[in-house]
Image (tube, rainbow, N blue to C red):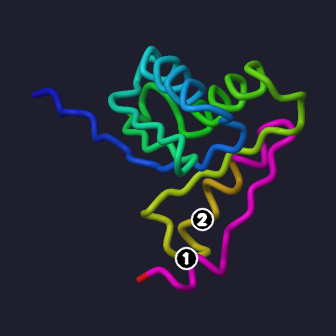
Amino acid sequence: MTTKPVATRATFSIHGLQTPEDALQLEKSLTACDGIRRVDVRWSTKNAKIEFDENVISAQGIARRVAEHVVGARLPPLSARVLLKIPSIRDDATARLPAHVLHKIRGGNARRDTKRAASSP
């Protein structure tokens, strides 16, 4: 019996989208990636809601793709910033593993937004 892979849903905050066309290009680029099932990039909010299979691509892999796309599009290196919001992270205990993994990305800085976390239901 084969089990169906569970999809992970995450919202990425994307800085560097300058036009609606940038959002469409990013959406097309991400949709072409293996393991990404659904992408909705909103230029007006600068957010990308992505559903993906972590057995094929990690959230860090998606963040790297987004950063490469945004930096390659118009921005000089080191000016792009990608924020990852994972709804299942509710406290410091559940944030440890993603923070540990993000610190391994060269130039990455994992930081938990405690203000937002404190106000979450």
> Which image quadrant for residue 25?
top right
Q: Residues within 10 Å of mark 2 (few under 14, many from 20)?
A: some
Tell which of 27 and 84 is nearer to you: 27
Tell which of 100 and 21 is nearer to you: 21
Element class at badge 2: helix
Looking at the rendered image, the quarter that the N terminus falls into is top left
Element class at badge 1: loop
Residue bearing the label numbered 2:
95
Q: Residue at x 41, y 83 (%)?
A: 121
- Amino acid type assigned to the residue bearing label 1 in the image: Asp
Was residue 36 drawn as part of the magenta stretch in this picture? no
Image location of residue 87, percent across then percent down: 44, 62
96 sits to left or right of 35: right
Q: Mark on residue 91? A: 1
- Amino acid type assigned to the residue bearing label 2 in the image: Ala
18 sits to left or right of 32: right
Count how many numbered circles sit on residues in the image: 2
Q: Is residue 99 shown above or below 63?
A: below
